[in-house]
Image: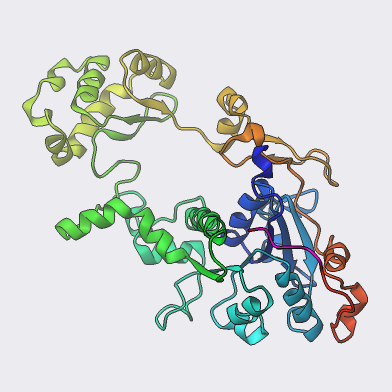
Amino acid sequence: MQFHETYAGVRVLDLSENIAGPLACLVLADLGADVVKIERPPHGDATRSLPPYWNGEATVFQTVNRNKRSAALDLKSPAGREAVLRLAADADVVVESFRPGVADRLGLGYDDLVRASPRLVHVSVNAFGTGPLGHDRPGYDALIQAFTGIMEMTGEADGGPVRAAPSVIDVSTGLWVALAIQAALVRRAATDEPQRLEGSLVDTGLFLMGHQVMGYLATGTFPPRLGSAAPSAAPYQVFSTTDRPIMIATSTDRMFVALCRALGLDDLATDPDFSTMDRRLARRFELAERLQVVLATRGSADWLEALAAAGVPAGPVHDLGEALAHPLTAERGLIAPVDGGSTPDLLQIHLPMDRERSAPRRPAPRLGEHTAEVLGEVGLRLDDLTGSGEATTTSTRGNPT
């Protein structure tokens, strides 16, 4: 079996929006699942309108929705609701990201969907959980970074809290949800019961802070903002050179000695004030200043060559364009053209897993591109959406175990 056939025969109904839920469904799609994305007309997923665009298509939407089919359905209409329930009856997994309570009001809550598909794996992606303290809170990546303390620890020492640039909460939540679904599909072979899963952004944010959380529970303190520096190792930060910054990451006493000798600071290597990590952390700012004086005398290429020869972990600080243009990026083969679609020069990025056997990369679908096709598979027609929503035939597709 090819890697991208892992979930062949598994059907996923993607009722989620933005990044976390759609990313989880993308993982399953790349593994061979048939993912049907339900979008509400006339605009569809909210990320379809977010710039920048590639040939008129939002790049955020393209990133997390390839290899899916799109059906445009009005979930507030009886016919649209009936169509979703009919599709759910034929699905193995449903992923939704409605604010708590919305799905029930639409008649598309957990109980409604499980009546349609008694062995369903149902996943709710939310921001702060469904309990009384969280269900009414709006939730976006930046709000979770702020709530969990990530922003308070991020930024320069003399500045204010800073948001991490990547959508680390959304992306990480999507990966956790995908992993939870995979586990549920394994359990499904041994149970006739439905499975109810939850992916919460706040849980992800706290888990990303795992060792800081443990440190706080142990000591009652947490690291202050340190810019590029690390709270548990020094020197472990960005330094300036004559032309551009470099990152130096020493995490052991041996590395520190090697760094000092590469910089011609043999006296520093033997100075008892800096001989252990605890002592270096206690004098981190004094240490950084002494190193910076020397590093500012030569260019980045010279220093990186010297540090590499000494076995000191160090590297350039790239911007995104430089990172993508680096030969190593091409060597990894993560970025490649899509297969087909209306934008022939469109590129996509692989999941960072076993790319040699991953699925072909079809571009993200146009809004409602597959509505008629998807409805036909469960015995409905487009005309049914303007009527009572009742279908005259039923699907014969069997759910895999």
Residue 283 at x, y percent in the picture? 15, 38
Q: In which quarter of the image is residue 300?
A: top left
Q: Which of 222 and 337 is in front in this view?
A: 337
Q: How many marks?
A: 0
Seen from this angle, which residue lies furthest right? Answer: 383
Residue in the image at 70% along x and 71% along y:
88
Looking at the rendering, the stretch of residues picked out in magenta corresponds to 396-400
Answer with left or right where residue 206 lies relative to residue 328. Answer: left
Residue in the image at 41% along x and 83% along y:
132
Residue in the image at 80% along x and 62% along y:
367
Residue in the image at 28% along x and 51% along y:
211
Residue 83 at x, y percent in the picture? 79, 76
- 399 inside magenta stretch: yes
Residue 300 appears in view:
yes
Q: Nearer the viewer, residue 79 or 43?
A: 79
Quadrant position of the N terminus in the picture: top right
Q: What secondary structure is the magenta-colored segment mainly?
A: loop
Residue 222 at x, y percent in the picture? 23, 56
Answer with left or right where residue 377 lies relative to residue 184. Answer: right
Quadrant position of the C terminus in the picture: bottom right
Q: In which quarter of the image is residue 334?
A: top right
Answer with left or right where residue 221 lies relative to residue 21. Answer: left
Answer with left or right where residue 328 lies relative to residue 31. Answer: left
Q: Nearer the viewer, residue 132 or 346?
A: 132
- Is 353 situated above or below 52? above
- Is 38 situated above or below 35? below
- Is 277 situated above or below 178? above
Residue 126 at x, y percent in the picture? 51, 70
